[in-house]
Image (spheres, rainbow, N blue to C red):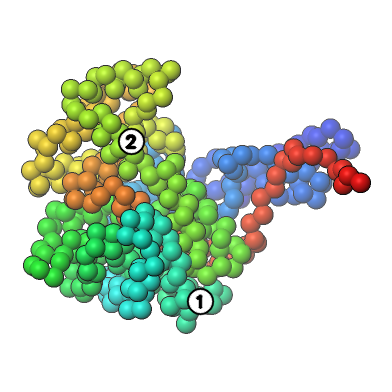
Amino acid sequence: MTDKQAQLTVDGLDSSLNLPIHTGTIGPDVVDVSSLTAKGLFTFDPGFVSTASCESKITYIDGDKGMLLHRGYPIEQLAEHSDYLETCYLLIYGELPNAEQKEKFTRTITQHTMVHEQLTKFFGGFRRDAHPMAVMCGVVGALSAFYHDAMDISNERHREIAAFRLISKMPTIAAMVYKYSIGQPFAYPRNDLSYAGNFLHMMFSTPCEEYKVNPVLEKAMDRIFLLHADHEQNASTSTVRLAGSSGANPFACIAAGIAALWGPAHGGANEAVLTMLAEIGDEANIEKFIEKAKDKNDPFRLMGFGHRVYKNFDPRATVMRQTCDEVLNELGLHNDPLFRMAKKLEKIALEDEYFIERKLYPNVDFYSGIILKALGIPTEMFTVIFATGRTPGWIAHWHEMISGSYRIGRPRQLYTGAAPRDYPA
């Protein structure tokens, strides 16, 4: 914070308004407009794209520099040296754990991956062909009916227990959603497996034969979770904070975040990549679709290229690209028509001047979509996996807000409807 101020002159006011300017650790200065309401004014900012809705110490993004920091640590370093559960700990507690803390945290999460047995009956109320996100949203919201013993949000220990339960049970619920959709029995979690390995086991094991977790695929799954763990004040995180500002229980808040993530403009990007590849259909059609993408009058757009926030490159994509190659090599899929088509698109985007000038580089969604497809995960499950990975970020932001001073969210509006009028006699 600094003592700098901005002056705002408004027609009709006798004097200028002095507005404090706040300075964060890094990033642009922020003009504090909270005092405007006392003067009968407020700002107009559709989508809140120019408004800081909160103060946070969790994640920082600099889109121009391609920077993503979790508690100050670059995402590239976390992806190389850390793992998903350690990153969860970092997001929630603010510091990396020592060896003892990490072991205890991992053990706690591992020992709480089972869900209440009665919850399994809840699935029977959904149609088998329901979208997985519809089921996920309903089941996570219903957790509050099963785990209401520790939901005093003013109690720090209760908030911690809720965090443990959500992080541990989300992959179990995600796998149950998939199993229910294909008519297979639920696979119970195993405490001898890692977080990512256990998820793959619950997704793909059956009672008929033993399922062995492939370590290359296990590492890839862990990285997908890690690279999606948090992304600052996006639509779903802001939704979690807004729901939490009313005092709602944490399960309801996370269910609200899942609902926001479900939107194709937010969490459906990697699913859109596979839809695009299906539309292209064949490697021979790529040049035609590239020309369509360059034609500003053609509605076709390349999905998975460029990013609304990152203007030069997506720091997560560099890590995901390496993981993508590792998975395709391990599974021998480099000659598969779909993946050959994807790799040719990647090559064009990285070499064609049109894409280079417009910074339409392959982003994290491009690679994660290819990886998940290679793992045998259906496209309608992609956003469910995104939600699973994003859970610690949502929890960290909810916990940070509840732990400090906050007020219920109440955005204003620019009213353009009818003026006062009398009801006709």
- Look at the picture and state if 342 lies above or below 184: above
Q: Residue 363: in sight, yes or no?
A: no
Side (left or right) of 397 relative to 405: left
Q: Nearer the viewer, residue 40 or 298?
A: 298
At x 84%, y 32%, the residue is 11
Horizontal and vertical percent position of residue 260: 48, 52
Label at residue 304: 2
Closer to the chain start, of discs 2 and 1, is 1
Tell how many labels.
2
Amino acid type at image mark 2: Gly
At x 47%, y 73%, the residue is 144
Q: Residue 372: in sight, yes or no?
A: yes
- Look at the picture and state if 44 lies above or below 34: above
- Look at the picture and state if 122 lies above or below 6: below
- Look at the picture and state if 109 lies above or below 343: below
Label at residue 273: none
Q: Nearer the viewer, residue 154 or 367?
A: 367
Contact? badges 2 and 1 (CB < 8 Å): no
Q: SS of the residue at dot 1?
A: loop
Q: SS of the residue at dot 2?
A: loop
Q: Residue furthest front?
A: 425
Horizontal and vertical percent position of residue 312: 38, 31
Side (left or right) of 215 relative to 378: left
Amino acid type at image mark 1: Met
At x 34%, y 29%, the residue is 302
Q: Find residue 61 and report its image quarter.
A: top left
Q: Which residue is mark 1?
A: 151
Q: Nearer the viewer, residue 385 or 19?
A: 385
Q: CA distance from mark 2 to mark 1?
A: 39 Å
Q: Find residue 132 and report its image quarter.
A: bottom left
Crowd band around label 1 with a 10 angstrom C-alpha radius: few (<14), some (14–19), many (20+): some
